[in-house]
Structures are given as C-alpha cells and as structure tokens.
C-alpha cells in the first residue's frame, strides 16, 4: 500500500498522512492555558496573589460598579418610601394605696401582693377603656392616620383604639415604681400628646375609682345607719309600751334608768305626797298674796322669786325633753306634775 492510497474502511478508518507532512501537523490543543488554570488568588508558593486579585477586580470593574449603583439606588428608594416613626415617652409613679373603708383599730386594710398590684396597673394602662377614653379626648377617630374615615363612628373609635394599644408600650423603670409609657407614631406631635394624655387619663381614672370606692362605703354606712336608727326607735317604742302596761317607773334618765317596786315605790309615793302638799300650800299662799291689797312686799319676797325660778327651770327642762320624748312618756308626766 502506497503512502498516498486511502485507508480501508473499518472501525478505525481514516486517512494516513504521508511521512513528509507529519512534522507540519498541529499538536493537540491544550485543555486550559497554564496561566489561567491556577487560582489567581494563590501565588506559586501557595499564598495570596494580591496583584492577581487586583487584576481580576479591574477586569470586572464595570460589573462591580453596576452592582453598587443598583444596590445604592434600591436602598435609597426604600428609605424614601418608608414613613419615619417617632417615639414619645412619659413617666408616672404608681403609688400603692391600701383600701380602708372602716377607720377602726381592729379592722385590717385590704392588701394585695406588690407584683400583682403592679401587673394590674400595667394592664389598666393598656386597657381598651383607657384607650377609648384617650381617643375621645384627642378625637383620634377623625384622624386618617389612626382610623379609616369611610367607617362608621363606632368602628372608627374601635379601630383608633386598636392602633393606640398596638403602638403603646408600658415598661417599668428598673425595679422602681416609676413606669415608662411610650407611644410610637408617624407624627411627633401626636405621639407626645397621646403619651401625655394616656398618663393624665390613667390618673383621672384612678381618682375616679377611689372616689367610687369611698362613695360606695359612705352609701353602705348610711344604709346601715338608717336601719339601725329604725330598729332603735322600734325598740324604744316597744319598751315604752311595755313600761306603761306593767306600770314601771323609770328614774335617772340622764345617768341610766332603773325600775322601782315594793318599799321603794311606797317611799317614792310618800315623797310625792309631801311635794304635792307643799305645792298646794305654796299655791294657796301665793293666791292670798295676790288678793291682798299690800302685795308689793310679798311679790318682792325671796320665797316667791325662788318659786318662779323653779317653775321657769322646770318649764325649760320640759321643753327640752319634749324634742326627744312624747308628752305621755313617764318622765314627761312626772315633770309636768312638778310644774
């Protein structure tokens, strides 16, 4: 077979080049250039290739600049579209007060654990009732930042109260009784007004609760006093009726009372008869003096003056006791007899 003859067809069919062309044939193309096959960040000794990294950055500088400009623009756009928020903070000192209804030495006041009391105050500061009160005071239901103007009044009040509670923060100042009340909003003026109004409304509601407690205690005592007074009057009435039915005399009303019977009653009757006899004698003498033509010296006598003074004192005592007792009361009957 000559060098120029074609090769036979087969699994390895091809054309054999002549010997004269073998030196001019192309060598196999390398898979990768040895200059670019190694890591540009590593030197030949295995270290970091600084200048290789610089060359890589310089080759890709336009792409890097485009990424930086795109990121900066996106951040600036998001910053401009974001609404700034402002935080306003007010502080309040929560003093624990004991609930005392009865001012008595043997009645202990109602006490509550300190942690439970402070937790209750935090809950009251974030309560819906307080939030709706602030909404009404500041008319937040008419502000589009807190409520949708297209809703009804009740729904707007409810939505504004929900927004207020959501953006309201209540936190203690360390381990003290000072509480920080903060509100976060888009308007710094509204945030400050809301924080201050929440604190003021909390103080007012606390005073109202204290007044309601005092009013309830006063009403409770007044009702009990009326009941006790009615029961006392009924008891006195039954006592007087019983004394009248049993013919019991009571003496010493100003220093206590005691009943008389037996010998003591006889002695009292004797004294009464003697007093009546003296009264009749004095009255007779008085009438004789009035009928006498020379009555001037008798009218100026010491005995007559003494009788007049006694009658005036007894009349005054009778009028004073009449404001408390009825005329048929035993003491009143005896006093009338003496007059």
Image (cartoon, grey):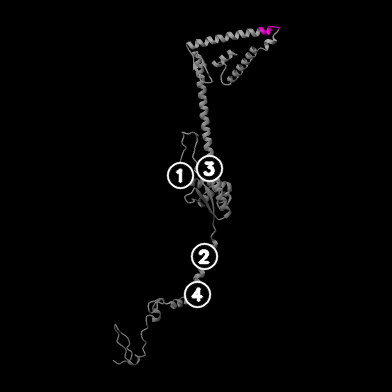
Q: Is residue 136 above or below residue 302?
A: below
N-terminal-most mark, 3 or 2: 2
Q: Is residue 230 above or below residue 138?
A: above
Residue interval drawn in magenta: 288-293
Is mark 3 in CB contact (under 8 Å) with mark 2? Answer: no
Quote the CA–CA distance across marks 1 and 2.
49 Å
Q: Which mark is residue 114?
A: 1
Helix, strand or loop at mark 4: helix
Q: Is residue 300 left or right of residue 43?
A: right
Q: Residue 193's spot in the image, x, y percent?
A: 57, 51
Q: Which mark is residue 274?
A: none
Is mark 2 in CB contact (under 8 Å) with mark 4? Answer: no
Q: What residue is rendered at 47% in x and 44% in y?
A: 117
Helix, strand or loop at mark 2: helix
Q: Nearer the viewer, mark 4 or mark 3?
A: 3
Q: Which mark is residue 206?
A: 3
Helix, strand or loop at mark 1: helix
Q: Nearer the viewer, mark 1 or mark 4?
A: 1
Q: Is residue 108 left or right of residue 331?
A: left
Observer-nearest of 181 and 53: 181
The residue at which mark 4 appears reads as: 62
Quote the CA–CA distance across marks 3 and 2.
48 Å
N-terminal-most mark, 1 or 2: 2
- Judged from this view, the residue extending furthest toward the right is 293
């Amino acid at each position: 077979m000559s060098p120029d003859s074609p090769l036979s067809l087969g699994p390895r069919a091809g054309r054999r080049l002549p010997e004269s062309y073998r030196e001019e044939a192309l060598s196999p193309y390398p898979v990768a250039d040895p200059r670019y096959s190694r890591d540009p960040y590593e030197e030949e000794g295995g270290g970091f290739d600084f200048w290789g990294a610089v060359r890589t950055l310089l080759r890709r500088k336009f792409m890097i600049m485009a990424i930086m400009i795109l990121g900066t623009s996106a951040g600036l756009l998001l910053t401009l579209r974001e609404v700034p928020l402002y935080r306003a903070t007010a502080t309040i000192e929560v003093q624990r007060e004991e609930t005392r209804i009865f001012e008595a030495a043997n009645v202990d006041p109602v006490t509550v654990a300190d942690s439970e009391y402070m937790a209750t105050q935090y809950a009251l500061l974030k309560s819906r009732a307080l939030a709706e009160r602030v909404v009404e005071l500041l008319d937040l239901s008419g502000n589009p930042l807190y409520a949708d103007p297209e809703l009804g009044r009740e729904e707007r009040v409810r939505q504004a109260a929900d927004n207020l509670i959501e953006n309201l923060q209540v936190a203690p100042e360390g381990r003290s009784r000072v509480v920080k009340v903060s509100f976060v909003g888009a308007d710094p003026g509204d945030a400050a007004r809301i924080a201050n109004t929440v604190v003021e409304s909390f103080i007012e509601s606390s005073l109202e609760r204290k007044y309601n407690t005092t009013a309830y205690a006063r009403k409770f005592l007044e009702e009990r006093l009326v009941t006790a007074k009615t029961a006392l009057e009924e008891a006195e009435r039954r006592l007087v009726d019983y004394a009248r039915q049993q013919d019991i005399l009571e003496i010493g009303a100003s220093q206590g009372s005691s009943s008389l019977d037996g010998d003591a009653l006889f002695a009292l009757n004797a004294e009464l008869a003697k007093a009546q006899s003296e009264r009749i004698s004095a009255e007779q003498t008085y009438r004789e003096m009035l009928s006498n033509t020379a009555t001037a010296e008798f009218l100026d006598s010491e005995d007559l003056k003494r009788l007049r003074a006694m009658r005036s004192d007894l009349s005054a005592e009778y009028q004073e006791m009449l404001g408390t007792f009825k005329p048929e009361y035993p003491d009143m009957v005896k006093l009338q007899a003496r007059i």
